[in-house]
Amino acid sequence: MSLAEEADVPSAARASGKKSRGRFAGLSSMLMIEIIAVNAGLLGTIVYALGTNGTWGSLSASVMISAASLVSGGLIGILFGVPRSIAAAQQVDGKPATTLIGANTNLEQISDWLTKIIVGVTLTQFGAIRREAGRLFHSLAPAVGGADGAAAFAGSVVIYFVVVGFLIGWLYARLRLSLAMSGADAMLELSRRAARAGDTETAQAARETARSLTQRSTDA
């Protein structure tokens, strides 16, 4: 593809924005499902806390346990879903391998290491993890009211919000972050090539498209 042909990429992307509304509408529906799941868990936690002893201490502790579990699961989900920089195979015309998403970053390497560590420890120390999880749930029981079955409820809260947070983080990394990274990288590469060729208009349009892609990844 020549530089003149690539110059039409930003305008073509903008022209296809209306056709992509269905995809973004699907993402909004997914966001609504995530919000409903979080609110349903919070509602159940609050109702239980108010039904046991009804103190503000147990209520705030239950909410903070839910929030901590949700954030922890979200961070793990992002670690598992961080997009990788994939080097393309050798091209048929003899050009060197190129990058599909972008150059390697320390975040990708750390994510890869932590993912392997988490999976390895989980598989080899499953019994110990189960015992320590039971101790954690029993230690959280007084915070959520201390009634009969409080340990089971605390464990349910932790597991529920960790799973929901994991799914939210993983889906965000896979559906938003990866698309934003690959699209922005392609537009920045086009901008650099256009700038070297002296086509400032195309370079500016490509930079604006890359900026809009990164901003879109943070939109609801």
Image (cartoon, rainbow, N blue to C red):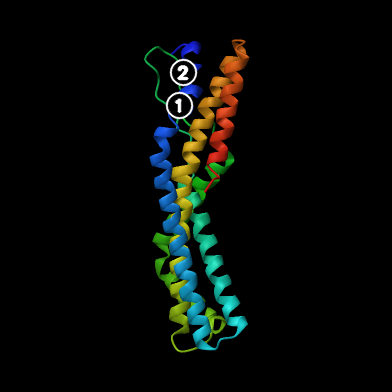
Farthest residue to the front: give it: 18
Q: The disc labelled 2 sits on which kind of residue?
A: Pro
* Foreground of the two, 46 or 167: 46
User: At numbered mark 1, what does the secondary structure look like: helix, strand or loop?
Assistant: helix
Q: Let me know if residue 192 appears in the view.
A: no
Q: Position of residue 146 (x, y in %)?
A: 52, 87
Residue at position x 55%, y 76% in the image: 62
Q: Position of residue 55 (x, y in %)?
A: 60, 85
Q: Is residue 121 above or below residue 137?
A: above
Dividing the picture into quadrants, the one containing residue 127 is bottom left
Give the class, few, some or many, for how many residues have Cα within 10 Å of label 1's Cα (few <14, many ≥20). few
Q: Is residue 115 left or right of residue 218?
A: left
Q: Which residue carries the number 2 mark? A: 96
User: At numbered mark 2, what does the secondary structure look like: helix, strand or loop?
Assistant: loop
Instruction: Specify which label sits upstream in the sequence, 2 or 1.
Output: 1
* Foreground of the two, 203 or 169: 203
Q: Nearer the viewer, mark 2 or mark 1?
A: 1
Residue at position x 56%, y 86% in the image: 54
Number of numbered discs overlaid on the protein picture: 2
Tag of residue 117: none
Farthest residue to the left: give it: 92
Q: Position of residue 213 (x, y in %)?
A: 53, 35
For the residues labelled 2 and 1, the Cα–Cα distance comes to: 32 Å
* Foreground of the two, 8 or 91: 8
Q: The disc labelled 1 sits on which kind of residue?
A: Ala
Q: Quadrant of the N terminus?
A: top left
Residue at position x 50%, y 70% in the image: 42
Q: Position of residue 124 (x, y in %)?
A: 40, 61
Q: Which residue carries the number 1 mark? A: 15
Q: Is residue 169 above or below residue 140?
A: above
Q: Let me know if residue 182 appears in the view.
A: yes
Q: Is residue 39 above or below residue 85?
A: below
